[in-house]
Image (spheres, grey):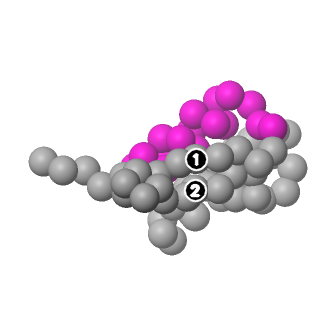
Amino acid sequence: MDEFNKEIELIEKKNPSEVNGPLSSYFTVTQRENGSYRLTWEKNVSTHIRHKVAALVKKHYVATTL
């Protein structure tokens, strides 16, 4: 998950006026019993930041099957 953390930090750096403190403190990712993941927002943040983080969660947590 190092790559995930690096990309989260990059979002923080590109949007300093919208993120106060570490972006990772704004959300939690939990795994459900069925194996899927849930993204829960702990603090308010703009919609475009939410979309960027959701895309990263899909990219790094959800395994792609071909």
Say left or right for 41 vs 59.
right
Say left or right for 20 vs 8.
right
Q: Residue at x 69, y 51 (%)?
A: 27
Q: What is the span of residues highlighted in magenta in the rendered image?
A: 44-59
Residue of label 2: 29
Q: Amino acid at mark 2?
A: Val
As drawn, 26 above or below 5: above
Q: Residue at x 74, y 41 (%)?
A: 15
Q: Is residue 46 visible?
A: yes
- Percent from the top left, x then y, of residue 18? 81, 38
- Percent from the top left, x then y, of residue 64? 25, 50
- Percent from the top left, x then y, of residue 12? 71, 51
- Percent from the top left, x then y, of residue 43? 81, 45
Say left or right for 39 vs 14.
left
Q: Earlier in the sequence, mark 1 or mark 2?
A: 2
**How busy is the neighbourhood of tag 1: few (under 14 within 10 Å), some, or many (20 plus)?**
some
Q: Determine the main secondary structure of the stretch shown in magenta.
A: helix
The disc placed on residue 39 is 1
Q: Residue at x 58, y 47 (%)?
A: 39
The image quadrant of residue 10 is bottom right
For label 1, the SS is strand
Say left or right for 22 vs 10.
right
